[in-house]
Structure formats: C-alpha cells, structure tokens
Image: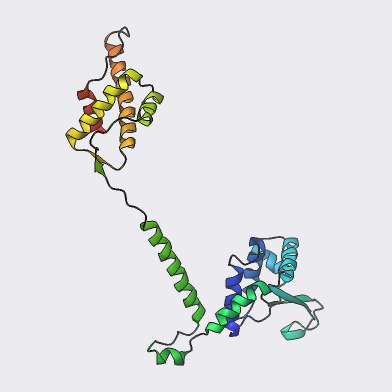
Amino acid sequence: MTSQAKLFQWRKMIASESGPQPTTRHILLTLSIHMNEAGGSCYPSIRTLAGETGLSTRTICTHLEAAERGGWISRRMRQPGNEGGRSGQGWRRHQYSLSFPEKVLKEVQRVSSEGVETDSTRKAKGVEPLSKGVEPNDIKVLKEVQLRSSSRSSKRSSGPQKHKTPLPQNYKPTDRHIDYAKSKGIPENQIEDLFEGFCIHHRKVGSKFVDWYAAWQTWVRNEIKFARERSQRAMGNQGGQQPAEPLTLEEIEAMTNAN
C-alpha cells in the first residue's frame, strides 16, 4: 500500500462503523489535515486542535489518549529544533503518526492485497490514466457509495405497488366499519343506511380508491360535517326549536362531490 493510499484508508476506517467514538473520530480527522499527502507525522499543538475542533483542551487530551490506547495513532515527544522545528524556542510537542488497530488491520491488508491499477495497466486495458491528484481509492469508494445508493433505491421501488380499484361487489360493513362510525357519534341504527348510501353513490359515479376503508372514514367525517352545517341552518331559520332532519342521499352525494 502506498503512503497516500494508507492515509486514505486510515481516514476511511476512522469514519466507518469500526472507527472510534464520534468525538475521538472528529479529533482524529481534524488531526489528519495536518499530515501531508503521504500521511506523514504531524505535530499540531493541543491549543491548535482545540481551536479547529471547537472542543476544550482537556477534551482534546482525553480523546488523543483514548485514540492512542485504541491503536489509531502513535505519539512521541518531539524535541525542540527537530525535523524543521524552531531551534532555540524551548517548546516541546507531541508528534503524531497514524496507525491501525489490530481489529481493522486485516481489512486494510485485504484492500491492499487487491492491488491498485497503475497508469500502465490502465493503458493496457484501454482506459485513460488517472488525472494527477486523483486517488484510485477515491474512485473505488465513490463507486461503492453509488452502488449502495442504487441498491437502496431499488429496494424502495421494488415493494408491492397498490392500485386504485372500484368498489368490490357485495361490499359489506365489518365490525371495523361500524365501530369507526360509532366512534364519530353516528347512531347505530343509522349506520346501515349510511353505508348503503356510501355504496350506492360510489357505484353510481364509478369511484376508484386504493383503500376503501379509508374512503368510508372520509364519508363518515363528511356526513358529520354536513349534518352539523344543516343543523345550524335549521336552528337559525326556526329559532333553535327544531332539530335537523336526517340527511338525504342527494345531500350526501352533493357534499361528497364537493370534497
């Protein structure tokens, strides 16, 4: 595995389900921006990481220690003036290098053993070489994401499709139909006539629904609404002395067509 591919795989594993807890993950990915393209070691200060992550310095220290124990990084104290440091400044910092926990190392080695195509092998296959700065593994991961997205979309669309159908022949009210009407305040002795009017109307107009029980619920709600409006009109015309008369089939049909 090349150094560049190693850094990419490390970041990928950090962000996977096998990676550390979210806060540690956030800190490590932030730490990785200080590494060069080859995944070389880096030495940002705790205060720098705190500013970049929005976390406290104490939290940074706690989770870096956890990451080291988990095998995600290795740390060593970097002496002043070493490896491009500021000689004579007198400060010391930890130097961080990426590493892989044993539990994920086998997966990294498996990916590495699959090999990465070079420009020469791509040309032999009639494929254009990769553009400069494009990581082969980036393309591989992109294809995996696209494949998974396509698979999820296919699963969603492969479910049973429901279609609208006309009212079934000999459609009869069940306990469920009756209980719903009762729950909305329809007197039990009126439910049979109400259901008959429902069937007559929808057969007459050739209605089609995906869910006929839902259509019955709408019919009941509309009947109650229309009855209330009719009762209010009757109370206004007669000084509130007479109750509203039962709905006629024509009134229910007019109300339903209006909705």
| 184 is higher (above) or lower (below) than 106 | above
| Viewer-nearest residue: 48 or 251 | 251
| Residue 232 percent across, percent down from the top left | 31, 16
The way the protein has been coloured in the rendering is rainbow
| Residue 118 percent across, percent down from the top left | 48, 89
| Viewer-nearest residue: 34 or 117 | 117
| Residue 101 visible, this angle | no
| 179 is higher (above) or lower (below) than 149 | above
Dividing the picture into quarters, in which one does residue 31 lie? Answer: bottom right
Dividing the picture into quarters, in which one does residue 184 lie? Answer: top left
Residue at the image point whose x is 68% and y is 72% from the top: 72
Dividing the picture into quarters, in which one does residue 229 lie? Answer: top left
| Residue 168 percent across, percent down from the top left | 25, 38
The C terminus: image quadrant: top left
Residue at the image point whose x is 57% and y is 72% from the top: 12
| Residue 145 percent across, percent down from the top left | 47, 69
Task: Please give left or right for residue 120 compared with residue 192 in the image.
Answer: right
| Residue 259 visible, this angle | yes
| 192 is higher (above) or lower (below) than 11 | above
